[in-house]
Amino acid sequence: MGEDIIAAFLRRLLEEYPATSTDSVLRLEQQLRLEWGGARVYIGKATAEGKARRLGAALAGGVPLGQAIRESGCSRSGAYRLLSRRWRVR
């Protein structure tokens, strides 16, 4: 089955923040395993915000609409729904 979710999370944490101490990571792992060990949990899918940002970035880069839709991971109808929304630029 592969790596469990806690090990994957901690590995990515260390990749993103290499200055994190080993003691902190081990303490976090122990706390998470005590709290969640053996539980069945649900992890929801990514929000539409990430797809919207990828779609917008591709379109801003001059990529044709059909290609931008494919590359963003949106369905065609989902992409048009995203494009019809009013977006606030941050």
Image: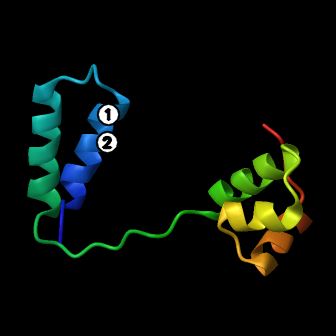
Image quadrant of residue 18? top left
Residue at point 17% right, 35% down?
25
Left or right: 27, with 57 as reference point: left
Which mark is drawn over residue 2?
none
Image quadrant of residue 73? bottom right
**Residue 51, image x, y percentages:** 67, 60
Examine the rendering and report whether any part of residue 35 can be seen: yes
Callout 1: few (<14), some (14-19), or many (20+) C-alpha neighbours within 10 Å? few
Element at badge 1?
Answer: helix
Residue at point 21% right, 54% down?
6
Q: Which quadrant: the C terminus?
A: top right
Element at badge 2?
Answer: helix
Q: Considering depth in this image, is 9 or 2 the residue closer to the camera?
A: 2
Callout 2: few (<14), some (14-19), or many (20+) C-alpha neighbours within 10 Å? few
Q: Residue furthest top?
A: 19
Left or right: 32, with 48 as reference point: left
**Residue 57, image x, y percentages:** 77, 46
Q: Residue furthest bottom?
A: 77
Residue at point 78% right, 50% down?
58
Examine the rendering and report whether any part of residue 85 can be seen: no
Q: Which residue is mark 1?
A: 15
Q: Considering depth in this image, is 26 or 75 the residue closer to the camera?
A: 75
**Residue 62, image x, y percentages:** 89, 47
Q: Which residue is mark 2?
A: 12
Left or right: 48, with 68 as reference point: left
Q: Contact (CB < 8 A) between labels 1 and 2?
A: yes
Inspect the image, locate mark 1, and give the three-letter code of the amino acid beneath it: Glu
**Residue 40, image x, y percentages:** 22, 76
Q: Which quadrant: the N terminus?
A: bottom left
Inspect the image, locate mark 2, and give the three-letter code of the amino acid beneath it: Arg
Q: Is residue 87 shown above or below 28? A: below
